[in-house]
């Protein structure tokens, strides 16, 4: 802010805040002299700001009502002395406002060690956003093909094939919209309230080495086709529009005329004349989730198959086997499910035992109770042919069980995270026993929270081999079935380990099929490992939405690193370390803003081979490196304290850990993060590299000495060494001095405040000098003499303030100064002071409301130009 900026503009922003904040803000500015005092009968009451904001604002934007500071005859804009008093008034106004606008001091214990904004992340050169503007939305990463270094993304009307090394390097793009007639029919049916009448790509599966099978919503009429992803022959080629209405291009060239291209390695185009129905493969409504798996030429999908979105099913289509589905409109099987994930997990070495697992959440209700959300895991046998007389062309091996993710309380009552949001299957050396990670959130509005739970296949199989759930009794309650279980056990695959003589489910006795139809649910629930979540977040302003996991080899062992996407557009990198008595220690290594405009993360894929994380959202696609070691610091101690398994001190810098590095120079300690032990020989140079700077202040004014820690886990201490003294005295918050997380605030400077100030951080008993500066306090007489010599007006006498802000009101000062509203205030004030002079007559400053209206169009996204690179 410049000295000419009026701080009373802050109170205009406060008019939407609680009235006590507005009153406090006005009182602070009146004390400074920036507002007319209470004896001004024409001034509207601050309480009217909520009921008559226009009158309150117009009074303070009127140049005739603009107050003069202390001396009404002094020219306000030209008085340099007033600029110093101006800054003090800014402090008082902002601090008064900070007491209620910003969040309280209850910071979560899981604060990230490093937080990078979108701009900071981009400056590291480790993140890249898909920069070709398409008239599209709802980008989803649907398939990774690491063998061909390609990633396939579906969005509204577009299919993208992106290079895994660089998603902006010659992207292959297919434009596949619906026919105009179909879109018109969709709009007339009333389904285009939010642009749903488009072709939202929801399924991309590898059909063979050269083709993909792709399905889209087709404006509430699902359609599927094949995409040729083969290789070009030599010579020049032309981009041709497919007969189905699709158009392909390289690097987003959407001209209608064909243009010759040089020979390229890949082609990416729709196969003409291959469009078929997508019913049972892709949903009608783009807002409804679907999952799919193409196995041995057969497509398994969890999907809603009707226009109204009421008939949910697990379908099998294509291939040579009979088309199958779950029992229709049977709430015992599926009750308004939201499908999350599908994955093939073998049960044994026998292929006939292979089962496909579906993860979803659905509504469940007891007699007399309102429906509640429960998370489920279901499974089917791949070779299920349905029953002979009963359940014809319907699954006869479908079973489901409840997934529990809860925190046990001291009183034995569990706090449940009921809504499954995402699943990640972490492969192990034994392909029959992968580790399953699930992200859960809280249903209802009691509190906001999310958790990550980990499940073992041994626990899952134990539940599916346990008792079945059965409804009986006067209240129709769920209980364990205690009757006779027919043979073969319901849910057993034909021709497998336990039924080698039964080659098909059609050979099963009718009592087995009937039992399956009425008892698809297991009685016992599946609990996570150690009966509690791995990661928990409560009382925060975000929820986890997606998860990806990487296994990293470090100097002291292997670690699972969790990448957690949130609904505010950030990705957190987390590790959880085991401690004694089954306790764990969670470390949030970093949190980064992936997109320029905050938007929920919808899909994430990870590539350990390329050390990249690929992130999708409604607005676009981005990829970022799994590690940014250099952001932790430039000394060995900072690198060691970060405890990032990807990073180690190599003797010169914090860089990617490699087991091939020389042990003599390599320093890494993920388990304990002890820099005193690990960084011997490097610590002596840490404090020597601290540069000493000089800062000046004027006697009677306020100054701020900035010192910010790299990590929220450190404690900061300030020491003062006065001139001609060898003693260093620790500085504490008292009287005129206030210690904050951002630095040291000293009010009413005195000559005795001069000296050398040192800011020292302490973490794990390691001390590090962050800032060393010399504060020189100039007397007001000296400053006045300089101003007089230069022809400038002298400083006005500083008067004592009747309003003294509390210590808590200073705490978030620097945070306030970075709020987005401050840029708006700054522009408003500058325009006002340029146009607000009385001599200008009718040329008055723009109102804050007009300024807000001008800012709105700049925040909107325009997609008229399709070929201009832009940031998301």
Image (cartoon, helix red, strand yellow):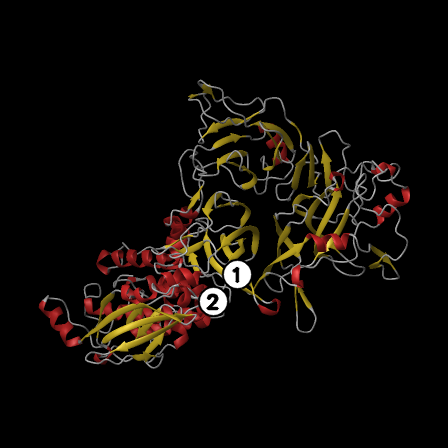
- The secondary structure type at the circle numbered 1 is loop
The x and y percentages for residue 179 are 59, 28
The disc at residue 103 is: 2
Give the answer, above or below, for where 119 lies relative to 284. Answer: below
Q: Is residue 62 left or right of residue 518?
A: left
Q: The residue tagged with tag 2: helix, strand or loop?
A: loop
Q: Considering only vertical position in the picture, is 347 above or below 28?
A: above
- Quarter-wise, where is residue 91 in the image? bottom left
Q: Residue at image x 51%, y 38%? A: 136
Q: Position of residue 374 (x, y in %)?
A: 70, 56
Q: 778 or 783, which lies in front?
A: 778
Residue topped by disc 1: 541
In this view of the protein, can residue 429 be seen by the observer? Answer: yes
Between residues 536 and 459, which one lies in front from this camera angle? 459
Image vertical order of residue 156 relative to residue 745, above or below: above
Q: CA distance from mark 2 to mark 1?
A: 10 Å
Residue 68 in sight: no
User: Which of the pair 707/842 is nearer the observer?
Assistant: 707
Residue 200 image point, x, y percent? 58, 37
In the image: residue 672, left or right of residue 401:
left
Q: Camera-side residue: 803 or 514?
A: 514
Which quadrant: the N terminus? bottom left
Cβ–Cβ under 8 Å for marks 2 and 1: yes
Residue 12 spot, x, y in % from top left:
39, 63
Residue furthest to the top in view is 235
């Amino acid at each position: 802010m410049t000295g000419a900026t009026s701080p009373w503009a802050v109170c205009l922003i406060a008019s939407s805040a609680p009235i006590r904040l507005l009153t406090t803000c006005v009182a602070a500015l009146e004390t400074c002299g920036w507002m007319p005092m209470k004896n001004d009968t024409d001034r509207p009451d601050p309480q009217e700001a909520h009921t008559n904001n226009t009158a309150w604002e117009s009074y303070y934007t009127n140049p005739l009502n603009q107050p003069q500071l202390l001396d009404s005859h002094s020219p306000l804009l030209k008085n340099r002395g007033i600029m110093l008093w101006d800054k003090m008034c800014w402090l008082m106004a902002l601090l008064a406002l900070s007491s209620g606008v910003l969040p309280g001091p209850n910071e979560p214990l899981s604060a990230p060690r490093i937080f990078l904004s979108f701009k900071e992340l981009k400056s590291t050169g480790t993140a890249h956003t898909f920069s070709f503007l398409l008239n599209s939305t709802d980008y989803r990463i649907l398939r990774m093909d690491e063998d061909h270094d390609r990633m396939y993304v579906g969005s509204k009307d577009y299919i993208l094939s992106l290079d895994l090394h660089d998603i902006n390097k010659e992207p292959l793009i297919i434009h596949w919209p619906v026919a105009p007639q179909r879109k018109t029919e969709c709009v007339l049916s009333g389904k285009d309230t939010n642009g749903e009448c488009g072709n939202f790509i929801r399924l991309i599966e590898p059909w063979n080495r050269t083709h993909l099978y792709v399905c889209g919503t087709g404006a509430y009429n699902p359609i599927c086709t094949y995409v040729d992803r083969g290789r070009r022959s030599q010579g020049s080629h032309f981009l041709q529009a497919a007969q189905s209405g699709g158009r392909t291009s390289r690097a987003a060239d959407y001209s209608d005329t064909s243009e010759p291209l040089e020979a390229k390695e890949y082609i990416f185009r729709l196969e003409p004349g291959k469009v078929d129905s997508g019913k049972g493969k892709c949903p009608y409504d783009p807002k409804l989730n679907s999952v799919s798996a193409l196995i041995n030429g057969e497509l398994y999908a969890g999907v809603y198959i009707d226009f109204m979105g009421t008939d949910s099913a697990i379908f099998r289509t294509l291939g040579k086997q009979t088309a199958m589905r779950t029992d229709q409109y049977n709430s015992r099987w599926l009750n308004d499910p939201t499908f999350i994930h599908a994955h093939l997990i073998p049960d044994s070495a026998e292929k006939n035992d292979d089962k496909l697992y579906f993860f979803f959440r659905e509504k469940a209700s007891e007699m007399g109770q309102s429906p509640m959300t429960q998370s489920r895991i279901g499974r089917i046998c791949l070779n299920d042919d349905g029953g002979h007389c009963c359940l014809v062309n319907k699954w006869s091996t479908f079973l489901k069980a409840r997934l529990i993710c809860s925190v046990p309380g001291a009183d034995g009552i569990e706090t449940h995270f009921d809504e499954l949001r995402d699943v990640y299957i972490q492969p192990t050396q034994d392909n029959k026993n992968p580790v399953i990670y699930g992200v859960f959130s809280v249903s209802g509005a009691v509190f906001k929270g999310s958790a990550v739970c980990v499940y073992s296949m041994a626990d899952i199989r134990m539940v599916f081999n346990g008792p079945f759930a059965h409804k009986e009794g006067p209240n129709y309650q769920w209980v364990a079935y205690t009757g006779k279980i027919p043979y073969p056990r319901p849910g057993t695959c034909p021709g497998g380990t336990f039924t080698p003589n039964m080659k098909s489910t059609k050979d099963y006795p009718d009592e087995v099929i009937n039992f399956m139809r009425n008892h698809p649910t297991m009685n016992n629930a599946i609990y996570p490992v150690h009966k509690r979540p791995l990661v928990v977040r409560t009382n925060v302003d975000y929820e986890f939405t997606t998860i990806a996991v990487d296994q990293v080899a470090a100097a002291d062992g292997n670690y699972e690193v969790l990448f957690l996407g949130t609904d505010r557009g950030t990705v957190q990198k987390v590790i959880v370390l085991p401690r004694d008595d089954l306790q764990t220690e969670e470390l949030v290594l970093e949190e980064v803003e992936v997109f320029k405009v905050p938007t929920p993360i919808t899909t994430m894929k990870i590539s350990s081979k390329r050390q990249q994380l690929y992130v999708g959202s409604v607005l676009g696609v981005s990829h970022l490196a799994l590690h940014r070691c250099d952001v932790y610091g430039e000394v060995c101690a900072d690198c060691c304290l970060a405890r990032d398994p990807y990073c180690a001190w190599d003797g010169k810098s914090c860089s990617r850990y490699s087991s091939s590095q020389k042990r003599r120079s390599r320093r890494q300690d993920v388990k304990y993060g002890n820099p005193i032990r690990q960084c011997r020989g490097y610590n002596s140079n840490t404090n020597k590299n601290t540069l000493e700077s000089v800062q000046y202040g004027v006697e009677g004014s306020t100054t701020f000495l900035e010192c910010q820690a790299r990590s929220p886990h450190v404690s900061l201490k300030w020491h003062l060494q006065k001139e001609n003294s060898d003693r260093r005295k620790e500085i504490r918050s008292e009287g005129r001095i206030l210690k904050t997380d951002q630095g040291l605030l000293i009010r009413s400077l005195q000559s005795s405040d001069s000296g050398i100030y040192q800011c020292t951080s302490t973490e794990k008993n390691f001390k590090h000098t962050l800032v060393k500066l010399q504060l020189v306090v100039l007397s007001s007489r000296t400053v006045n003499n300089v101003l007089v010599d230069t022809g400038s007006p002298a400083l006005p006498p500083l008067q004592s303030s009747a309003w003294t802000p509390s210590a808590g009101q200073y705490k978030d000062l620097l945070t306030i100064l970075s709020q987005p509203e401050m840029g708006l205030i700054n522009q408003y004030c500058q325009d006002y002071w340029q146009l607000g002079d009385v001599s200008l007559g009718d040329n008055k400053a723009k109102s804050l409301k007009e300024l807000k209206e001008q800012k709105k169009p700049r925040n909107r996204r325009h997609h008229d130009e399709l070929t201009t690179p832009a940031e998301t």
